[in-house]
Image (cartoon, rainbow, N blue to C red):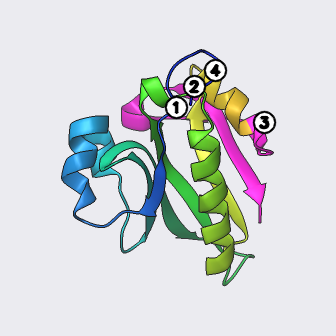
């Protein structure tokens, strides 16, 4: 089976990550992806071609501040898809699965951050029904312009 660009479609499997995935994620998607998986304080979902990870979304649970006592959100700490698998719906499927999982866990929203230079990501969040709120972050003292994105569950 081929996609619209004439390249062969690879069947993907989607599953929840465990510690055994960390090494494979590091090999295929890099150190940043491997460092950001969440197992006990959230969850990580993986898209894999056979046993090779080609995408992931990692969500951490966050307790919301007053006056939202007792409410939690799922915060997408990282979403990554290998370049050859981009624009094939992998990220959309991972986000949809993450939203379902967060809703089932009792989260009131799913939220993420994206820097403004990630134009494709900003377009993706909008297409997936997330609201975008311009914001400035200051990691390591440097100003980074971007957007918080959120969708109620």
Could you tell which of marks 1 and 4 lies nearer the N-terminus?
1
Q: Which residue is mark 1?
A: 9
Crowding at label 4, few (<14), some or many (≥20) Cα neighbours within 10 Å? few
SS label for mark 2: loop
Residue at 77% in and 66% down: 153
Q: Which residue is mark 2?
A: 2
Foreground mark, 3 or 2, reads 2
Q: Taking 20 as reference, is 8 above or below it? A: above
Residue 104, given in percent of the width and then of the height, sits at: 66, 78
Q: Which mark is residue 127?
A: 3
Query: Could you say which quadrant of the image residue 83 lies in?
Result: top left
Q: Tell me whether circle 1 and circle 2 mark residues in contact (CB < 8 Å).
A: yes
The magenta span reads 126-153
Residue at 40% in and 31% down: 141
Could you tell which of marks 1 and 3 lies nearer the N-terminus?
1
Q: Which residue is mark 4?
A: 119
Residue 39, given in percent of the width and then of the height, sits at: 36, 69
Q: Nearer the viewer, residue 27 or 38?
A: 27
Q: Tell me whether circle 4 and circle 2 mark residues in contact (CB < 8 Å).
A: no
Tell whether 96 sits left or right of 8.
right
SS label for mark 3: helix
Residue 144, given in percent of the width and then of the height, sits at: 52, 27
Residue 34, given in percent of the width and then of the height, sits at: 28, 48
Crowding at label 3, few (<14), some or many (≥20) Cα neighbours within 10 Å? few
Q: Taking 12 as reference, is 118 above or below it? A: above
Q: Quadrant of the N terminus?
A: top right
Residue at 48% in and 63% down: 60
């Amino acid at each position: 089976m081929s996609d619209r660009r004439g390249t062969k479609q690879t069947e993907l499997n989607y599953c929840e990550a465990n510690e055994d995935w960390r090494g494979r994620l590091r090999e295929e998607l890099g150190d940043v992806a491997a460092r950001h998986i969440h197992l006990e304080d959230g969850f990580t979902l993986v898209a894999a071609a056979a046993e090779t990870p080609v995408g992931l979304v990692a969500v951490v649970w966050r307790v919301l501040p007053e006056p939202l006592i007792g409410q939690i959100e799922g915060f997408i700490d990282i979403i990554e898809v290998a370049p050859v698998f981009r624009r094939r719906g992998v990220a959309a499927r991972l986000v949809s699965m993450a939203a379902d999982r967060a809703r089932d866990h009792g989260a009131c929203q799913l939220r993420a951050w994206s820097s403004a230079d990630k134009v494709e990501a900003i377009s993706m969040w909008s297409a997936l029904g997330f609201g975008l709120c311009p914001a400035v972050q200051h990691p390591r003292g440097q100003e980074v312009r971007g957007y918080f994105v959120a969708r109620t569950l």
